[in-house]
Image (cartoon, grey):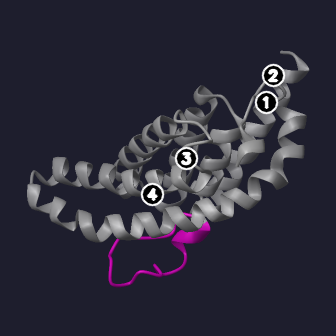
Amino acid sequence: MTQHQLHRLVYIALLTATATIIGIVETLFPSPFAFAPGAKLGFSNLVVLMAIFTLKKSDVIILMILKLLLTALFTGFSVFLYSLSGGILSLLAMYLIKMMGPKLVSLIGISLAGGFFHNVGQLMMATFISQTPAVLLYLPWLAFFGLLAGFFIGVAGNSLLYKIKPINDLFVKENKIWMTDL
């Protein structure tokens, strides 16, 4: 293993640990959206958003799966399938939106898409598990909070991305991110 590969693995491990800890801590507090069961800000998604801009796609997928598995170990597997389906769909949406380029979409826009599609994925899984299409009636309500959370995560990510660039440069030298256009 080269030093570069080792640095990349350490960076992925640091991001995974950070996202896992944030996810666990967030479950210890009541939802700020008490009138919307299941809605939360999803602070650990900030780490995934940063990873999208600092790692290769395959590394981000590994990070997301590890984050979900580790968080489930500490908080319970009851929500794992919902988190996995939401995470996969939101990651796919964020990458598709990001492909439009920095002249058409900002990091906040990418985060908004992630917040919205995370909830879509979760409701699709709930519909599949319950075999009750009426679950999708909750989508407008959850979509609003997904967009709200996506906005706040995007704003935080916009500021944080510039702060982690020096750290990222130490670990992931080949990555090209469009930071100059954000």
The residue at which mark 2 appears reads as 5
Is residue 70 visible to us here?
yes
Answer with mark 2 or mark 3, whichever residue precedes in sequence: 2
Q: Residues within 10 Å of mark 4 (few under 14, many from 20)?
A: many
Amino acid at dot 3: Val
Residue 13: quadrant of the picture: top right
The residue at which mark 3 appears reads as 105
Q: Secondary structure at mark 1?
A: helix
Q: Is residue 106 left or right of residue 34?
A: right
Question: Which residue is nearer to you in this view: 158 or 55?
Answer: 158
Amino acid at dot 1: Arg
User: In front: mark 3 or mark 4?
Assistant: 3
Q: Residue at x 70, y 49 (%)?
A: 182
Q: Position of residue 163 (x, y in %)?
A: 84, 55
Q: Marks 1/4: CA distance?
A: 27 Å
Q: Residues within 10 Å of mark 3 (few under 14, many from 20)?
A: some
Residue 180: quadrant of the picture: top right
Magenta span has 63? no
The residue at which mark 4 appears reads as 115
Question: Which residue is nearer to you in this view: 27 or 113?
Answer: 113
Q: Residue at x 83, y 15 (%)?
A: 1
Q: Marks 3/1: CA distance?
A: 28 Å
Amino acid at dot 2: Gln
Q: Marks 3/4: CA distance?
A: 15 Å
The residue at which mark 1 appears reads as 8
* Marks 1,2: beta carbons within 8 A: yes
Q: Secondary structure at mark 2?
A: helix
